[in-house]
Image (spheres, rainbow, N blue to C red):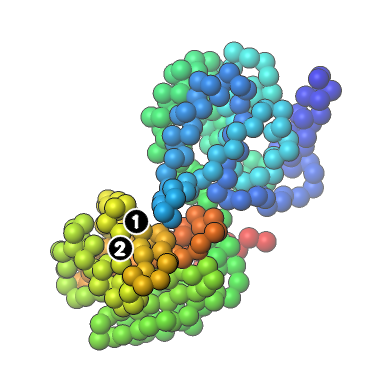
Amino acid sequence: MFRKISGILIVLACLTMSMCGYRQNGIGASDTIYVFANEQTRKIVGSAIDTTFSFGYRTPEFIKFFKTVWKPLDSFPEVIRFKNLIVIADLNQSDLGVKIAKGILPPEKYKLAEQDSIFIFAIEDVWVDGQMVVVIAGKDLKRMSRNILEQKGWLYAKFNQTFERIEKADIYAKNEQKKMSRTFWKKYQWTMRIQHDYVVIRESELRKFVWIGRGYPYRWLSVSWENGIKTEWLTANGLFEKRQEIGKYYQEIETDKRFLGTYFTQFGKWNALRMSGLWYHTKESKGGPFVIYAFYDPETDRTFVIDIILFAPVIDSSVLLRQVEIMANTFTTKMTDDYYDDVVVRK
């Protein structure tokens, strides 16, 4: 056992100090988080971690945005190069979790954990690039569990920001459709960054409606707008009716009223009303998730609605839907010289 732990620590030290010669990119799925803890620790804090990463959407089955995979501490070296890692250390013990926490955290932060002052520490790119490592450490495990729930928004955001950064780099790594993007800007004074393989499906200057998409799996994104402030689009009922209207443009698409979720959120630089739920085809056995945003842009005095739908049966579609949302979030009504330069393409 001593030789096993010593070997693990040598590997960790080698990677941490970049003694192995070069930095590698993180591997594995960007929507999977590996959580390491001993069995007793998991019994106490496990539900807090699972609650933190319980966000998701319906397809109509509920799919979480992040999958959490619990693993024993001694399996940590097997996934050390993966993108998303959480190590939970009970500082009353002397196991590998404690050794990892002590090896990663600066002495002053480790001392805070020992004092149960701060439990959660997030560190980027510890062993590989594009990696988020969270160390949760302390002696009072029940208090630790409560703190995880209190900080669940912050903890979720850390992994979500890493996910978006990685996926955005992948989306625009090759063949970004800058010509299409610039065409939209010239015609409508709005644009977005467009992934390869998207095509214009329908476009109407009269209706102020542009619909692009790609397949398979099918991903559609449409932009609707009107001059002035359309207050009805900024209400749940009004946005639902607008989505029904957009469904007619898509042809025979309706919105299921049973699973709607609506709240205000940040979309780019705007405070937007976000609605999500399920769509269905009125004549064919088709359906899937949708997300729609509505916001007013005071600089151009226009109200915009951006609608996203996905049709991906028998496919784990979580990443696909979120990729289209990432693309939608590049929407702008103010073109700048460096608009296409904010993504670091992963090597």
Looking at the image, tell me whether mark 1 or mark 2 is earlier in sequence order: 2
Please determine whether, in this image, residue 275 is positioned above or below residue 34: below
Count numbered badges in the picture.
2
x and y, in percent, of residue 189 in the image: 32, 79
Q: For this view, does 296 lie left or right of residue 163?
A: left
x and y, in percent, of residue 256 in the image: 30, 59
Work out whether residue 137 or residue 239 is closer to the camera in this orientation and state it: 239
Please determine whether, in this image, residue 140 is positioned above or below residue 173: above
**Splitting the image into 4 quarters, where does residue 171 fall?**
bottom right
Work out whether residue 59 or residue 42 is closer to the camera in this orientation and state it: 59
Disc 1/disc 2 C-alpha distance (Å) = 8 Å
Identify the image quadrant of the N terminus. top right
x and y, in percent, of residue 231 in the image: 15, 64
Please determine whether, in this image, residue 243 is positioned above or below residue 163: below
Please determine whether, in this image, residue 41 is positioned above or below residue 304: above
Q: Which residue is at a point 29% across and 86% down the rendered structure image?
A: 205
Identify the image quadrant of the C terminus. bottom right
Q: Which mark is residue 72?
A: none
Instruction: For label 2, count other residues whose C-alpha is less than 10 Å away and answer few (under 14), some (14-19) or many (20+).
Output: many
Task: From the image, tell me which residue sits under label 1.
Answer: 277
Q: Which residue is at a point 44% across and 18% down the rendered structure image?
A: 143
Q: Which residue is at a point 44% across and 36% down the rendered structure image?
A: 52
Q: Are marks 1 and 2 in contact (CB under 8 Å)?
A: yes
**Splitting the image into 4 quarters, where does residue 267 fall?**
bottom left
x and y, in percent, of residue 308 in the image: 39, 66
**Splitting the image into 4 quarters, where does residue 273 fall?**
bottom left
**Can residue 284 be seen here?**
yes
**Can residue 334 be seen here?**
no
Q: Which residue is at a point 55% across and 49% down the rendered structure image?
A: 31
Q: Which mark is residue 255?
A: 2
SS assignment at label 1:
strand
